[in-house]
Amino acid sequence: MTRALFATICLTYAVFAQHSQAETLTVTTVERPPFSYVDEGEDTGFSMDLLAALAEELGWEYTVVRVDAFGDMLSAVENRDADMAIANISITAGREARMDFSQPIFEAGLQIMVPSDAARSPSLMQALLSRELFIAIGLAFAILLGGGMLMWGFERRSQPYFDRDLNEAWFPSFWWALNLVVNGGFEERMPRTPFGRVLGVILVVSSLFIVSVFTARITSVMTVDAITSNINSVNDLYGKQVGTISGSTAASFLNRREVEFTGYEDLDSMLTAFRDGDLDAVVFDAPILSYFAAHEGRKIAAMTGGVFLRENYGMVFPTGSPLVEDVNQALLGLREDGTYDQIYRKWFGTRR
């Protein structure tokens, strides 16, 4: 009887000790606003709020360990130096083979971010302000003024309209030439001298050429700008300076599409290169880039195109971790009681 009681006490103590040990968790994460980052010394973000809600639901005590690189976070879990990891961790077959994932906690995908100037469509004003077109317009005005003054020289003694002194004749002469080119002139102001009539015919015929060149130049400037400047999809990335994070799902996608890119070790170095103008486009997780473009980079960055390569984020655990089932059940509970939706709205607004 005594031995049985002693065994029962020892077994109970061992169960409680194991349970207590499981409640104190090491959670690794990495800087990924708005999912996980430090604000005024406090861990915050969508993933951190979700972790806190899970801990309250499951009665956990946990310690957050931040690492510099995304790969270091995953390695800590794979090597069992951490009990779990949470941030913007995409659920992939390769990672699932090495670790265990929770059920999805966020639906995301990839998107393209470009400098804000490149996101603007070419406009008529941009075409008009081009140097080449400005020169063409200046030459057209010079030709009209020169043609009008030459007509004044031929017609000032034969046509009452041109019977003016030189210092008063320049604008009426220019106006006559402009009306001749645009409207065909005025019948009552038709040239009367042989030389004036020849010049009038030359001005009318040359005006067709001037208008054609003017129209063609605007069209070509806008077309070239649209082809060389705008990035609206993955197909526009070829030949551009593209950046992403090495080892990410975005890097794998770009490799499959044979798009050349520069790989960066972390988010900060990639965004620094973008700010410095070293990149024409960044391809990465849509919510991460959208948050940057709407906050820190709101004056220099813009999102373009739609979200592609849809993917889910999850929490990751060492293979065979007993925490996975508890977390999945708790996640279902947080979705059912509205806690998950409340956290989502806090960081991303109304769910789509």
Image (spheres, rainbow, N blue to C red):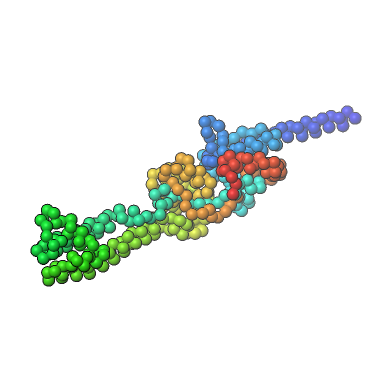
The residue sitting at 70% across, 34% down in the picture is: 59
Residue 169 visible in the current orientation: yes
Which quadrant would the N terminus be assigned to in this image? top right
Extreme-right residue of the structure: 1
Residue 86 visible in the current orientation: no
At which x and y percent is residue 325? 71, 44
Q: Is residue 196 above or below residue 263?
A: below
The residue sitting at 64% across, 34% down in the picture is: 62
Locate residue 122: give its quadrant.
bottom left
| 166 left or right of 294 in image | left
Viewer-side residue, 186 vs 151: 186
At which x and y percent is residue 229? 39, 55
| 296 left or right of 71 in image | left
At which x and y percent is residue 157? 9, 63
| 300 left or right of 46 in image | left
The residue sitting at 80% across, 33% down in the picture is: 11
Viewer-side residue, 26 vs 117: 117
| 210 left or right of 29 in image | left
The residue sitting at 57% across, 49% down in the picture is: 108
Report how many numbered discs are placed on residues in the image.
Answer: 0
At which x and y percent is residue 96? 63, 50
